[in-house]
Amino acid sequence: WARRTEPIPAQLEVVESPPTTLEIPGRPGQPPLRLDQLAGKTAFFVVVGTWSAKSPEGEQLNRALSRWEFPPDTLGFIVADTAGLGLLSKQINAQMQSYAREVKVPLYLDYHGDFLEAFRLPKGHHGFVVLGPKGEILTRHSGDVDSAELARIRRLLGAKEPAPGPPMPQLNE
């Protein structure tokens, strides 16, 4: 059940109103993720799960999000869909501790599936949500993105490509 994959619909289900009361508990020592506390900021959420560890789905978007530079009023979060795996929470928390140190945005574990349900995203796929400063949903996506969608997401987030680094030193012979 925890590893099931639902088909990606041609059109995601409508979300009647942004779930500003949604709260995802934090990992040990981490405050909860409360959407109502993001007012005035643009926030993006990457949804991953046990099924995505070995899948290339979302790879292009994840690499761009890791590379891009964001304005100070743009925040990012990773929400791991761990619904149905609460009995393994101690082991999952321990494993995610090292992963969380490697990513540049906070990582949250959703043991109840609240995030997928609130944003009507199908289970088993890379998910992506952007909320605007007023809590409005600017975009929701499930699955891979093409280059046009990637460019649109970059504009929504106010992100830019980093400046090129210094050239590689040349060896003198």
Image: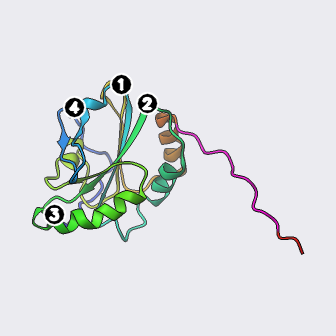
Amino acid type, mark 2: Asp
Highlighted range, magenta: 159-170
Q: Does the magenta stretch include residue 154?
A: no
1 or 2: tag closer to the N-terminus: 1
Q: Spatial distance from mark 4 to mark 3, Cα to Cα? A: 26 Å
Marks 3/2 in contact by CB < 8 Å: the verdict is no
Task: Please tell me which residue is depicted at 31% across the width and 26% down the height of the picture.
Answer: 39
**What is the CA distance from the residue labelled 3 to the residue labelled 2?**
32 Å
- Residue 141 at what x, y percent from top left? 36, 47
Total tally of numbered discs in the picture: 4
- Image position, residue 135 (x, y; %): 30, 28
Mark before the other along the chain sequence, 3 or 2 = 2
Residue 68 position within the rendered picture, expressed as x and y whole percent measured from the top left: 54, 46
Element assignment for label 2:
loop
Q: Which amino acid does label 4 sit on?
A: Thr
Among the two numbered marks 3 and 1 on one chain, the one whose residue lies closer to the N terminus: 1
Alpha carbon distance from label 4 to label 1 = 13 Å
Identity, as a three-letter code, of the amino acid under mark 3: Ser
User: Residue 89 bears which disc, if any?
Assistant: 3
Q: Is residue 89 left or right of residue 35?
A: left
Q: How crowded is mark 4: few (under 14 residues within 10 Å), some or many (20 or more)?
A: some
- Of circles 4 and 1, which is in front? 1
Q: Name the residue under label 4.
A: 20
